[in-house]
Amino acid sequence: MSDRMTRRTALTGTAIALGAGMTIPAAHAENIERGSGRDKPTPRSARAKGAAGRASTVEELPDPWDRAGARDLVLREGNPRSAGLDRGVLEQLPGILRAGIENDPPRFSGASLLVASRGRIAYEHADGWALRWKDTKQQLPQDQWVATRQDTIYDLASISKLFTATAVMQLVERDRLGLEDTVASHLPRFGENGKEQVTIAHLLSHVGGLPAFTNLWQNYPDVSSRVDAALTVKPTAAPGTQYVYSDLGLIALGKVVEKISGVGLDEFVRENITAPLGMTETMYNPPAELIDRIAATEYMAATGELVRGHVHDENAHSLGGVAGHAGVFSTARDLAVFAQMFLNGGVYGGARVLEASTVRDMFTDRIAEVTGAGGARRGLGPELSAWYYHAGLTSPYSGAHTGFTGTSLVIDPLTDTIVIMLTNSVHPTRAWSTTSVTRREVSTCVAHALGLVPKKVRDGWHAGSEDATTATLEMAVELDGRATELTAELFYHLEEAYDLLTVEASTDDGTTWTPLPGTLTSKDAGTIEAPAGTLTGWGCRALWDATFALEADGAALEGETQLRFTVTTDTNTRGLGAWVGRIQVRAAGGGKKLLDTDHRRDRETVVADGWVQGAR
């Protein structure tokens, strides 16, 4: 296809994951889910800016989104074992959902959850209520409550953007559209107010310079004037210079699809995506006869209406229920088919929706140079490496999308795993708790069920599974001034640039601490240098043999020396944490051992504050 962009290698992902000297701008905080993690401040510690990584062989890792030759797997009924997951771990999922429902206030009224891996549906669960509230203060009589089911239909909200992006990429494949085409070349009104150079690719990756949002439904009297207002909006930045998650860009892309194809966006999506994939329960503007299966959303005080059966997003509703940024309704099983299509390289059940190379391009990051370390990552539509809801499944390749109504889709190509959590978190009001707390807990539970933490360190010490904490793992040794090194079996998966693992030494009884330069090696992932003694990011999901020189300013440490591993986490969003297995202190080059935690006496001298041994 045209306008290909070379995939960022795992080497680049590793360097970013270690925060290689890059400052981190604050993301915009408009029109996003409260507490989602998209509005993260700059890193808590300046040390994050100094964390550095240089990889030697990591770049040889294959790109997991290179799906050329992937099998056309049609989702089948399965169980955790057949899908390669631990049933016992997945049995925690009902409790996670129930805690979200019983939270005060509830994080959501009801939820439908689906986990699939290796082409098999491993786990499904539904809980709560598709309909419960009359308004923001009164519940309906209990005999009118409608329980959530696996086939409950949800307003997907911004997950709709993935359908628009897929439609755009189909037109690119058919040479009817180019990624570097200016939007104005297809929609002349869009070029007004200085947007002549904004391209299709800019809008797909949210760097078109557009504002996040404008009120169309109240400020303009009809559909045509609302569309015109969306297209002619004034930019807030030059294209390609700033990431702002924008509904307006996707509204414009929906109109591009309609202009080129000559049919409505809903018709194009049905004929070219959902019908070929057999997604019979995915649609815009669901018919009235389906209302009993549709999850209710928000009570609108201005109109006295409880929204159920039409799109919750006010702009999309004012545009007739069909828009590039919102409007799609679906079930968990139908959405799983859409996700599996991507994992299959664009095909499902014999229906070719996209070329494998197009899927790869869609899930290739385009904005790292704009957002910097710890910033947002976007492909051509999908959101990538989103710690705020990918959580334990986060990698530079994890992708998909969330929706404001409480929906989320996570695709992990490294394990061919899909996690779908559909909720009605705005029922009865958007003012209640964020869904992302539960999204993170679900993703992390699935990550543990997949066994992403290596067995070799699971009986070691673990920290970083809670927010806003500092955990220290400390030990003391007597050094004689000769070259000595600290070694450890290490696994880390920490929110990039915000959660940190540091390795330090003190020779003055803990008054001052010196970071220890280290080298990490893995038979699966290569070598990483950590000269500042600080690690952050996804860690390549590898078990590392870490070696840290016990020195300061190039000179070996001497005398009674305290050593510590410290994990600090910020106030929200986290990964799997850090795990430390066998710890040794020995003469450089594998000489005499001064400490070895495989020996009970040495292990009992380790002081763990905030670290837990033998638990995840």
Image: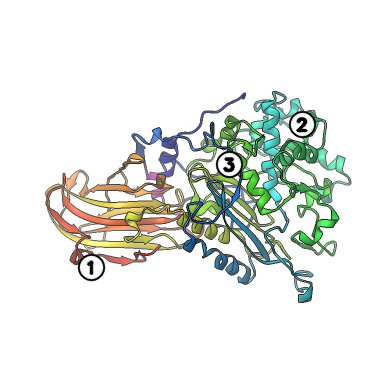
The colour scheme used to paint the residues is: rainbow
Name the residue nearer the viewer: 6 or 409: 409
Looking at the picture, does residue 328 appear above or below residue 68?
Answer: below
Q: CA distance from mark 1 to mark 2?
A: 70 Å
Q: What is the crowding at mark 3: few (fewer than 14 residues within 10 Å), some, or many (at least 20)?
A: some
Query: Which of disc 2 and disc 3 is earlier in sequence?
Result: 3
Q: Position of residue 111 (x, y in %)?
A: 65, 62
Residue occupied by mark 3: 73
Residue occupied by mark 1: 604
Q: Would residue 211 be seen by someone viewing this image from the given angle?
A: no
Residue occupied by mark 2: 192
- The span picked out in magenta is 44-52
Tell which tag, 3 or 1, sits nearer the viewer: 3
In the drawing, does residue 502 fall left or right of residue 305?
left
Q: What is the crowding at mark 2: few (fewer than 14 residues within 10 Å), some, or many (at least 20)?
A: some
Amino acid type, callout 2: Glu
Labels 1 and 2 touching (C-beta < 8 A)? no
Q: Position of residue 40 (x, y in %)?
A: 54, 52
Amino acid type, callout 3: Leu
Determine if the magenta segment contains residue 49: yes
Query: Which of disc 2 and disc 1 is earlier in sequence?
Result: 2
Q: Secondary structure at mark 2?
A: loop
Q: Secondary structure at mark 1?
A: loop
